[in-house]
Image (tube, grey):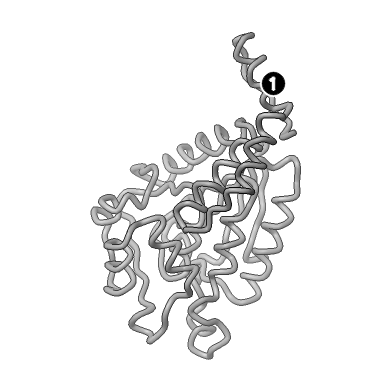
Amino acid sequence: MSSLQITQHGMVSTLTINRPEKHNSLSPTDIEQMMSLLDSLDQDPNVRALVITGSGDTTFCAGASFDNVKDGSLRGDAFSPLARTIQSLSIPSVCLLNGNVYGGGVELALACDFRCGIEGAQLRVPIAKLGLSYSEYGLKLYHAKLGLAASKRILLGADTVDFDALQSMSFFDTVSADLTSARAQCAQLSEQLSQRSPLALNTMRKALDGLSMQSFDATEFDGNEQACFDSEDKQEGFEALLARRDPEFNGC
């Protein structure tokens, strides 16, 4: 059975990491395959939102396979290309954390636009205990999403961060009492995102991520903003508002 599975509901695709017996850790092959799947989903006009989750009810993703890290086939920066791919998607992404999260799995969660979690979830990134360092991109991602103090606590402390601390860091966008409720919350959020104008969402997502990671491109933003103004989506949005109906955007 593949360690990665894709399911589709309406215009929302769900990518599930399916190695629960290994706490959904990823090998080099898994990472390459996941990047390829993400590229394919991003080019599919029938996909307007993405959910990334893990199998089981224990761990979302434990990061890199320990054996691969130990033998040197996965470096400390192994997850950064995958995280960059997630962040550069033209569709919004929601991470459904079906349990705890460790190592590179945290970077994947932070690369998503939103994170839906469960009460009691914990986090641990032991990279400093392994004599390794995150890549520049990974560090920028931590800093952009969590801030300096929280990033230092997670990365330099290298110990377990409990649920209350994660809440104080605003790690989760939504929190549910159990996995069933978290799935329902995630489904509601991803469905909502899939109904918004793709052009508008992508323009603002790219700009906000660029501002937070100090890579904002004003020229690119001006072009994207103008494309929104000239789009059929804008016309549809105003017509739907005047007609008091839900808009049906085509992304053009």
Q: Quadrant of residue 196?
A: top right
Q: How many marks?
A: 1
Name the amino acid, label 1: Glu
- Label 1 neighbourhood size at 10 Å, few (<14), some (14-19), many (20+)? some
Name the residue located 36 percent from the left edge and 76 percent from the top edge: 126
Q: Position of residue 203 (x, y in %)?
A: 60, 42
Q: Position of residue 190 (x, y in %)?
A: 55, 39
- Circle 1 is placed at which residue position? 236
Which quadrant: the C terminus? top right
Horizontally, residue 93 falls left or right of residue 173, namely: right
Answer above or below: position of 222 versus 95.
above
Task: Between residue 152 and residue 67, name the one nearer to us.
Answer: 152
Which quadrant: the N terminus? bottom right
Answer above or below: position of 219 versus 197.
below
Task: Between residue 214 and residue 22, name the one nearer to us.
Answer: 214
Name the residue located 33 percent from the left edge and 43 percent from the top edge: 177
Q: Position of residue 124 (x, y in %)?
A: 34, 68
Task: Between residue 46 and residue 232, name the one nearer to us.
Answer: 232
Horizontally, residue 224 falls left or right of residue 116, namely: right
Residue 243 visible: yes
Helix, strand or loop under label 1: helix
Name the residue located 39 percent from the left edge and 42 percent from the top edge: 174
Q: Position of residue 110 (x, y in %)?
A: 45, 57
Horizontally, residue 173 falls left or right of residue 27, namely: left
Name the residue located 29 percent from the left edge and 61 percent from the top edge: 150
View extreme (bottom): residue: 71
Q: Quadrant of residue 35?
A: bottom right
Answer above or below: position of 129 versus 22.
below
Residue 1 visible: no
View extreme (top): residue: 243
Task: Between residue 37 and residue 206, name the one nearer to us.
Answer: 206
